[in-house]
Amino acid sequence: MMKLRVMERWVGLQLLPPEGNLATMLVVNKLRKKLGISEEEMEELHMITGVICDKCGNPVENRGTEAKPEYYCLVCNDFVDTKVVPNQTIWNQAADIGKDIEFTKAERGIFIAAIGKADTDKAITPAQAAFWEQFIEAYPGADTVASEEVDK
Ligand SMILES: [Zn+2]
């Protein structure tokens, strides 16, 4: 079992192969569901994509129109200047305490293969290396499996 925070779950999601044989992809689909952030979690974490208040960094409400937005910050209790953060998601870090996720043998095999491939390609990112450290701590012996796979 691994206790994974939002960022770590995204690292896991990014490791999943975009395509493969049917058996692999059935496992990958299950992993997507396990690692993905549910709507309830998004609410708990106050997860938001888009526009935040310049002053306090909280998400703002549009009280104007789509064409002429006027952003109101509930925290500052005022209309405020905003930053648009494209493709960036923010959430309450304090509430992000991690979710316990258990991976089956087949699911672990997907990660082992993905890391093994990235390793061969010398394309491991620091976040992936950290994920892997957590992974082998949770599932000791996975590292020896990985090196065997790489040897093949
Ligand atoms: Zn504010």
Image (spheres, rainbow, N blue to C red):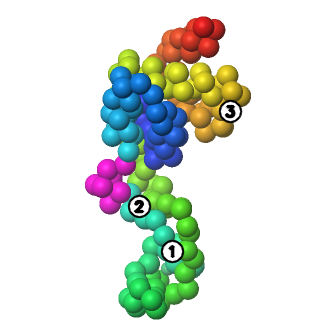
The residue range painted magenta reads 37-44
Give percent across and percent down for residue 10.
49, 44
Give percent across and percent down for residue 51.
49, 74
Q: Which mark is residue 123?
A: 3
Quadrant where the N terminus is found in the figure: top left
Give percent across and percent down for residue 28.
39, 32
Q: Earlier in the sequence, mark 3 or mark 2?
A: 2
Is the residue under label 1 in contact with that under label 2 (CB below 8 Å)?
no
Q: For disc 1, does the CB lie below 8 Å from ligand 1?
A: no
Q: Residue at x 42, y 46 (%)?
A: 97
Quadrant where the C terminus is found in the figure: top right
What residue is shown with label 1?
52
Q: Residue at x 52, y 21 (%)?
A: 112
Which residue type does callout 3 highlight? Answer: Ala
Whether residue 134 appears in magenta in the rendering, the answer is no
Residue 3, relative to residue 76: is it above or below? above
Q: Nearer the viewer, mark 3 or mark 1?
A: 3
